[in-house]
Amino acid sequence: MYADRHGYEIVRTYADEGRSGLRLEGRDALQRLIADVESGAADFSRILVYDVSRWGRFQDADEGAYYEYRCRRAGIQVRYCAEQFENDGSPVSTIVKGVKRMMAGEYSRELSAKVFAGQRRLIEHGYRQGGAAGYGLRRRLIDQGGSSKGELVRGEHKSIQTDRVVLVPGPAEEVATVGWIYRSFVEASLSEREIADALNDRGILTDLGRPWTRGTVHQVLINPKYVGDNVWNRVLQTEESARSQSPGALGPSPGRVRCDCRA
């Protein structure tokens, strides 16, 4: 162990378990570490980090250097245990750290692109990518051959990587209620509030077991999954923010396919 080899005693551990290293937000332990160092509350003289990427995979390589500098300015040295260089401020270590920080950021960008592409491929095949099914629908688990393995209850997730999740119509009474909501709004010209009141008068609860509100009725009416569309990665784009970006910087378009889940 690095600490034993160098005669260091571990007095405190800061760990951001399962957190992204792309930004400081959400890295509560790293923020607490910096706060302790700069406030003078730190009872240690060195910080041991496994390697440069564990300090952070910030998209701006200078950001990682900035946080390290704040520690060094407070008199605390940062040591990278698994790196082949000494973090001694020499030109060689400075250059190597800069290259490794850029490599760590690039790795995150490439990984993000691969994950996005994989999710998009699954969406294009009509598979569900997370989130509750909603009233009138259910999540069905299928294997890689397309055979049904049963329905997933709320809070339950697939455990086998090759399994997939699709949306299917739920109980007949819920499907009928969804149809009634649309007919009441389109044909009878009832308002969303009136529809919610009627559902509550009939003792019908939402998929969360709560009374209906204007907002929950609105979500049923505007959600494209009720007409069989599987929409993913849809974002709100205002006119002002669109003008501030180049046409090529608006990002990929949302995946949208037809699926057999019409209620």
Image (tube, rainbow, N blue to C red):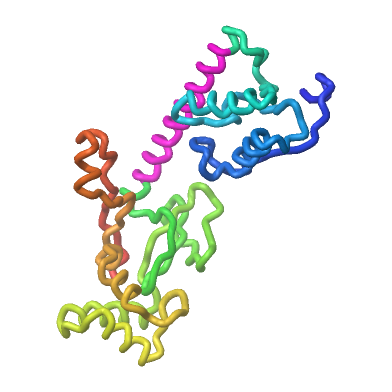
The image quadrant of residue 137 is bottom left
Which SS type dominates the magenta stretch?
helix
Query: Is 38 situated above or below 91?
Result: below
Query: Is 206 situated above or below 59?
Result: below
Taking the spot 39% from the left edge, 41% from the top edge, the residue there is 116
Residue extent of the magenta highlight: 94-121
Q: Of 245 and 119, which appears nearest the observer?
A: 245
Give the side of residue 187 with respect to residue 34, left or right.
left
At which x and y percent is residue 216?
A: 35, 74
Q: Residue furthest top?
A: 91
At which x and y percent is residue 91?
A: 57, 7
At which x and y percent is residue 159?
A: 56, 53
At which x and y percent is residue 171?
A: 40, 78
Q: Of 11 and 214, which appears nearest the observer?
A: 11
The image quadrant of residue 106 is top left
Q: Of 79 and 121, which appears nearest the observer?
A: 79
Taking the spot 45% from the left edge, 50% from the top edge, the residue there is 144
The image quadrant of residue 241 is top left
